Image (cartoon, grey):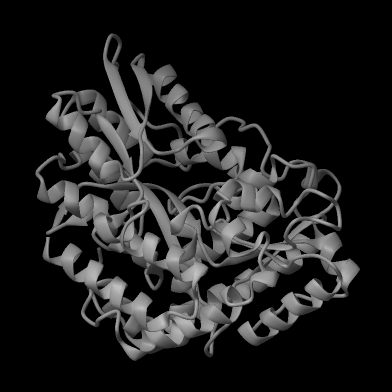
Amino acid sequence: MRTTPRTRRAVRAARTAAAVTALALAATLAGCGGGEDKDSGTKEPGPPATSGGSLALPDLKGQKIEVAAVWTGPEQENFTKVLKEFEKRTGATVTFVPAQDPIVNFLGTKIAGGSPPDIAMLPQVGAIQQAAAQKWLKPVGPEAEAQLAKNFSQGWRDLGAVDGTQYGVYFKAANKSLIWYNNAAFENAGATEPTTWKEFLTTAETISASGVTPVSVGGADGWTLTDWFENIYLSQAGPEKYDQLAKHEIKWTDASVKQALTTLAELFGKPELIAGGADGALQTEFPVSVTQTFTGGDQPKGAMVFEGDFSAINIAQTSAKIGTDAKVFPFPAVGAESPVVTAGDAAVALKDTKGAQALLTFLASPDAAAIWAGAGGFLSPNKNLDPSAYPNDVQREIAKALLESGDDFRFDMSDQMPQSFGGTPGKGEWKALQDFLKNPKDIAGTQARLEADAAKAYKG
């Protein structure tokens, strides 16, 4: 977790640039057509696009490597393609080990049983810190360090370091400040893309009046609700407050949190605007919240769904085509500017073996990133990945926005926190916001529960 302060001016400039790029993305989406659309999110990867030729890797014939991650479905399939390429180049045998959230607990059980995986993909900065504190992690070797220095900005490297020691290689990134929408439902309602929170609520009411429920929420997965809160909080309270809350330097009982929850309640407090109401949303997992937005033609269960660029993977499971049926706009500005929240998954080694270090090196290279980039639904923080590796202009624009933000981005707040508070199903922030979705009038009670759970987690 980075603790270096940045000036409001620099952050504002970077965020404005990213927001402008995101707006350009919306225009790009509207203009995508023909052969480009049919490739959106489904293109099979071709030969890896690299800078300076293929990466040299050691001969690992006979070695077995286990990689644990929480990815399932298309994400697991696409990551497996990356591992297959590593097998092809090295002769190693790599096994994907399905993990459960919270992955730190899963790893703890494996370590206690004497059978940790060689590599784990950690989806939270807090998980890296916790695993390092338990002395489970092995520092990255010189080959991986060289790839990181060559291919990643300092900000992404710092996110994978603890107390100056590099443990993590950020392989997959995300732009978590996007709202995808069913174009037919918008056209049927005469709705237009909103740019502010007030306009967003008006658009929702317009769509509701047309007979379609406007917003699909995957509330069964508490992390989606943390993302709703974070985008509102970042735009409304600003980057300095965001950083302070992420480190628990201010309490969850702070007035800024009350203001953000009050704003979020303007949506959550109107169950008729949410597909299935609060109860339905709390039973809807994230993938379903996306697919139900893009099925049913102009009468979907929800006309809009908020989440990151990775939603393209789920859209690809429907007949909707990105750019014609499925379009996107930046998360609306609650304060002066639209928010830009990022996230990512980092590879860490739990065994200091030749195979584990070689895989870290590979994952830090453009070669590895190009494989998943070609399959769609993926962003890489690797600055030397050839943009042509992405399957269409839509994803190239999203990737460009990520890289152009440099180090002046804000990482997912809940992912920076201790995992017991910010990353555990049924507990901490996830549970508190699920309860808030069910009863958005209880703002003070929600703040008190959040603060009590945060105080306990940060002390631990």
Q: Residue at x 44, y 58 (%)?
A: 223
The quadrant of the picture occupied by the C terminus is bottom left
Q: Is residue 58 visible?
A: no
Compared with residue 190, is residue 417 higher up or lower down, i.e. above or below?
Answer: above
Q: Give x and y (percent) for residue 423.
A: 33, 55
**Front-most of residues 133 and 86:** 133
Residue at image x 21%, y 80%? 249
Name the quarter where the N terminus is drawn.
bottom left
The percent coordinates of residue 10 (x first, y second) are: 39, 83
| Residue in the image at 9% along x and 43% along y | 135
Instruction: Report the side of 243 relative to 397 (left or right).
Output: left
- Number of marks: 0
Residue 314 appears at what percent x and percent y? 64, 45
| Residue 111 in view of the camera | yes
- Residue at the outermost top position: 62
Instruction: Name the image quarter holding residue 158.
Output: bottom left
Compared with 405, 287 (above or below) is above
Q: Residue at the spot x=51%, y=68% of the render?
A: 437
Q: Quadrant of the rendered structure where residue 212 is?
A: bottom right
